Amino acid sequence: MARRRTKKRTHVGASNGTSKTQPANSAATRAPKSMVIRVGAGEVGSSVSQLVKDVRGMMEPGTASRLKERRSNRLRDYTTMAGPLGVSHLLLFSRSSTGNTNLRLALTPRGPTLHFRVEKYSLCKDVLKAMKHPKGGGKEYLSPPLLVMNNFTSPQPADGETPSVPKHLESLTTTIFQSLFPPISPQSTPLSSIHRVLLLNRELPSSSSSSSKADGSYAINLRHYAITTKRTGLSRSIRRLNAAEKMIKERKNKRSIPNLGKLEDVADYLLDPSAAAGGFTSGSESEVETDAEVEVLETTTRKVLNKKQLEAYRKSDSKLSRPEGPAVEKRAVKLVELGPRMKLRMTKVEEGVCNGKVMWHEFLSKTKEEMKEMEKVWEQRRKEKEARKKLQKENVERKRKERGEGEKEELENNEGEWDSDDLEEDINDEDGMEMDDDGPVEVPAG
């Protein structure tokens, strides 16, 4: 008998659905999720559309990488679905009528929102074309990148002048960018799970030049790198042999395996400079900069012993020959750029999600009296909004009560009505008689 089909993609027990064993407030559900959106799809141009795709790849895996926008979609559509989908950040790319590319970074559901102008950007394909040895996309995007931030807190001016960006807004910007990715614990996070680096470097305005404010008081350079490591202290030939062994085990392409068919001994390949595919010429081949070397624990597997083997191991003197601590190896770290590149210039900070009170503006400054007037206006708007909500709630409750009383009266009326035809049929069934056009006809029993 054929086995019954089990739907594994959209039904209960699917691998892409929420598991029953996973609690609702676990670390996986609390992880930040983002949506990178083109506002006005089809109007931003092909370059900005490709930039949106590159930023989605950079934000992997906690982003909607296959999101499709429509021209009819509005901001309210995304904010409405952000709650049920667990989306915590919205990155909105748009193009103004003057041709400027803008980015809005908003926290849902209550804000705040950072407004940036994308002054310069380079796509991933442009970055890869400029590199001699580009790195292809692989398993790097299965884990979130390591966020590195520099100069996000400016030093206090020595002459006592007020900084261009207030301190509380600097800390707010730092917190928002830190919340884009899940936090990393140095004690529990394994180093093997970190494959990418997202570097955010703020350009501090120099107080000496008078044109620094014209260039932008809060500019951020964004770079995206992949982390590559290799063992140090090994010659190129030995590294090629190690790579060939891995390829044979994984049954991959064997083109990079060194050809030792013309050699009599493997020592000729390791020691002879004129050997095929390059031998061990000097120690400078394996040397790297000291700053790029790190010491990591060697990933070695230990065999699980049964009871007999464990007793034999305890009785033997193998404890003395066993090293006390874990093996440590040196690895050279190198960063390979993946793209995209962006230079962001912050222009405005709003209190809500793309609306609300303006907390800071680069080009507009208000006096204390004007700020007090704005506070009164926003307070009046808040009171009017609360009054509208209260009135809507009262109307809903009133309509619900009216609907409930109407249904109750209709039910009572239905219970009070008598159906004469049904009553006549019940009487005839009890007497064993059936009515006909000519009169009663006896129905035989059984």
Image (spheres, rainbow, N blue to C red):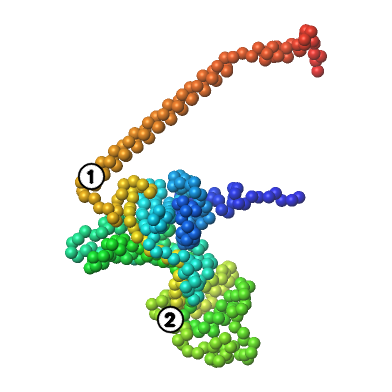
At label 1, the amino acid type is Lys
Residue at the top extreme of this rendering: 439
Q: Residue at x 41, y 59 (%)?
A: 183
Q: Which mark is residue 288?
A: 2
Q: Earlier in the sequence, mark 1 or mark 2?
A: 2
In the structure shown, which secondary structural element does the residue marked by tag 2 occupy? loop
CA distance separating discs 1 and 2: 60 Å
**Front tag of 1 and 2:** 1
Q: Position of residue 402 (x, y in %)?
A: 46, 24
Residue 187 seen in this snapshot: no
Contact between labelled residues 2 and 1, with CB atoms less than 8 Å apart: no
Q: Position of residue 230 (x, y in %)?
A: 48, 76
The front one of 276 and 298 is 276
Q: Position of residue 331 (x, y in %)?
A: 45, 76
Q: Position of residue 383 (x, y in %)?
A: 31, 37
At label 2, the amino acid type is Val
Task: Please name the residue that numbered disc 1 is placed on.
Answer: 372
